[in-house]
Image: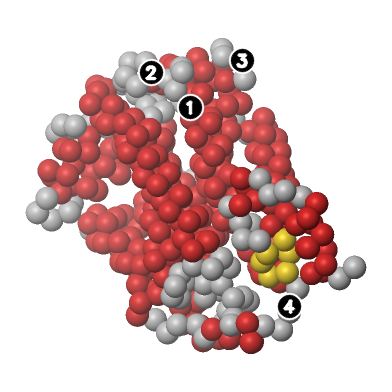
Amino acid sequence: MDFPTTMYYQSKTMRPNFFHHLHPPTIPAAQARWRYTLGAGGTAIFLMLVLVITGALEMFYYIPTPAEAALSIQSLTYHVPFGGLVRNLHFWSAQLLIIISAVHLMRVVFTGAYIPPRRFNYLLGLALFVSSIFLNFTGYILRWDTGIQWALVVGTNLIKTIPFFGNKLYMILIGGSEPGSPTLIRFYAWHVFGLMILSAILIGWHAFRVRRDGGIALPPPILRTDPERISRFELVRREVLTMVLVMAALIIFSIWSPAPIAAPIQLSVLQTVPESASAPWFFLWVQQMLKWGDPFVWGILVPFIMLLILVLIPYIFPKPLESELGRWFPKSNRLVQVILALMASLIIFLTILGSRPAL
């Protein structure tokens, strides 16, 4: 039985459910392989679902006040049945989400899958990546223990260095002239409502545009050399299998490696940042650059320029040829590949450098 006949047989014997209808009836087999997609887009959505469920469970026990925040996390971790596992799953899912989202972004650029009509969806995905970083940062602050002092003090003080409106933006962000009780409430509100609602909207919009823009980026039909396609049933089966494997790995890792926890912060010493204090791992590269000079230049301006370059990729750089779509590293967008590879290498190098213990 040839492949088209198999798909016809499936359509007659299997009735698509809601999840099947989220996918096109068929997609090219070559571009559906894991070595092309890396499973990054679907894994990112699944991790966000894990974060929503585990975060909702944590809300039953978390108390967003400076006196109770860290203690409530300790109670959840050590006294609530499976509370430690839930917290660990939430923490490691958040860390993995940033990595997977970065991999997905690089896959899109390195395969040239950002040209029209996918240009706007590329920007939606980039906005979703940035929102996931800030979600992670605000969740990091909610621990309200001594482990987050660098992020809370140094990280928020970077806002003050922005010319003209930095001080006002800082006061809006932390709820006063210095971090205190209003700061925790505001970060909690941004984490649970502002950023989470924004991310949910972006995810839905991003997924909708994937379908509307024609699914996976492909060369025109006349230039395709492999006619084989897979059905939506096979695609959903692969996605479910990936979710099961990711969930199993998360559970094993969460049991083996607990999320960080430290002593509660004392407001009286909040402005004092110990020399051993460190940024969250996803901002270690920024912390390392701050050692080079002006905080505004290295802590705000340089990261903003790097983000701006990513935003402008579909607009100012040479576009990949349609005939080269559907495979890795098209020759026609080599400049973009080199620029992104250099930026990624710099961030990884500085992150590794910043993670080394001080001598």
Q: Residue furthest front?
A: 12
Kindly state the secondary structure of the residue where label 2 is placed. Answer: loop
Earlier sequence position, callout 4 versus callout 3: 3
Near-viewer residue (26 or 96) = 26
Above or below, comparing residue 260 to residue 116 in the picture: above
* Kind of residue sitting beneath label 3: Pro
Residue drawn at x 83%, y 67% as measured from the top left = 5
- The answer to which of marks 4 and 2 sits earlier in the sequence is 2
Q: Secondary structure at mark 3?
A: loop
Mark found first going from the N terminus, 2 or 3? 2
Which is more foreground, mark 4 or mark 2?
4
Q: Amino acid at mark 1?
A: Ala
Q: Nearer the viewer, mark 1 or mark 4?
A: 4
The answer to whether residue 64 is above or below residue 176 is above
Q: Amino acid at mark 2?
A: Ile
Residue at (30% x, 61% y) in the render: 304
